[in-house]
Image: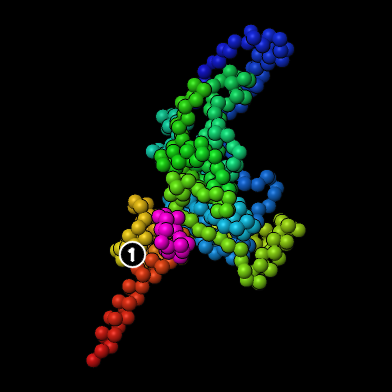
Amino acid sequence: MSAFKISPDLSSNAGYGHVEPMEEQAPRFRPASRPRRRAPEPQAEAPKGRALYPFSALVGQEAMKTALLLTTVDPTIGGVLIFGDRGTGKSTAIRALAALLPPMRAVAGCPYSCEPGRPADSCEHCRGLRQGKSLDASVEIPVPVVDLPLGATEDRVVGALDLEKALARGEKAFQPGLLAKAHRGYLYIDEVNLLEDHLVDVLLDVAASGENVVEREGLSIRHPARFVLIGSGNPEEGELRPQLLDRFGLSLDVVTPTDLETRIEVIRRRDAFDRDPHGFCTQWKSKDVALRRRIAAARRRLPLLAVSEDALRRATELCLALGTDGLRGELTLIRAARAMAAWQGAAAVDPEHVKAVGVMALQHRLRRNPLDEARAAVRVERAIEEVFGQDKTGQEKAGQEKAAP
């Protein structure tokens, strides 16, 4: 990025003794041997040396784990919204996902971790390198899983002027925000239903375009920002804005387990992790490695899977039966069904895969029905039984006709 000389008027600050020495010593902060490009720093979810609870050690909550794993197979599904009781493992599962994801390749020195070989999705930095024909160098980095705190400022989220470079070197440079760090990874918002409205507006703009545009302090920056949005929260603390709700591909409700043995096993494993985190992680490392390999295999299988005509028809019939607005429901349903088929190692996407992901893909897309007080998940389950029950009834009738003399 090009730099511009800033010439501030410091006459009004003449009484501050520290200003003038800073102006004289500024060149010391620019070592001649310092490289201009560097590999992006891995976005760790926990401080260095701190162990994360293994994903494979999670007990129960199968729907939540399945939804998260499907997004690792196909990020275009659009993210996951997890609502439920406190203390049900929502945040633990999402943070455990960080250590489970296979590493990705990025352009060396790119501040946005652009993918090599995809010029259409590159940033200004990579376009400049392409002109100089030095874009071949790439590095392997962890997939970023970035936390967006509720109290974050808009500058911290979208990026702003780098004040350190402005004051020390006289450069007008852009400091990337959380959206840039989450590019090609995951952006996690705990208590997403409590997020400030101005940040919700920012997320809606970026989610719709896949690009973050910053126009402030004399800066005009445009960079890619495509990520899987993960939100969790407690529905008792408030509802989510419909516009943001529609941007989540999958949605599910988690509840406190009522089975005695399940609760005992949760407590046993968590206590073992708290007493010896690294030993516990070592114990479950082989299972996490097996999951990581299965994710990689499912990703390779995904582009080869064809969606059967029957699966397309059932997906459309289900959305029509539920009265969902728009066509985003069908698109998400097919993407999730394809990811499920890839995860299970199937040869093609059939109606059973559509049925398996129907509730999590559609329950948050229903209109309120004052005459039906049932939960959204129950309404989707009823519609699934009606739509997919037709196949079973038809097969039974066909069998009876063949058996008839």
Residue 378 among those drawn in magenta: yes
In the foreground, 281 or 140? 281
Residue 95 in view in this figure:
yes
Residue 216, compared with residue 379, is above or below; it is above
Res. 153 image quadrant: top right
Task: Reply yes or no: does residue 55 show up in magenta.
Answer: no
Q: Nearer the viewer, residue 285 or 208?
A: 208
- Measured from the top left, where is residue 296 in percent x and y? 49, 57
Residue found 59% across the figure and 55% down from its top: 90
Taking 270 as reference, is 361 left or right? left
For image coordinates 53% across by 42% down, the residue present is 182
Q: Position of residue 398 (x, y in %)?
A: 28, 81
Residue pointed to by mark 1: 314
Nearer to the camera, 309 or 250? 250
For label 1, the SS is helix
Compared across the picture, whether 235 is left or right of 283 comes to left
Depicted 238 relative to depicted 375: above or below = above
Return the x and y of residue 181 as percentages of the image width and height. Answer: 54, 39
Q: Is residue 143 above or below residue 151?
A: below
Could you tell whether 82 is left or right of 340 in the image? right
Residue drawn at (63%, 56%), measured in percent from left and top?
86
Quick check: can you spot residue 348?
no
Residue 277, located in which quarter of the rendered image? bottom right
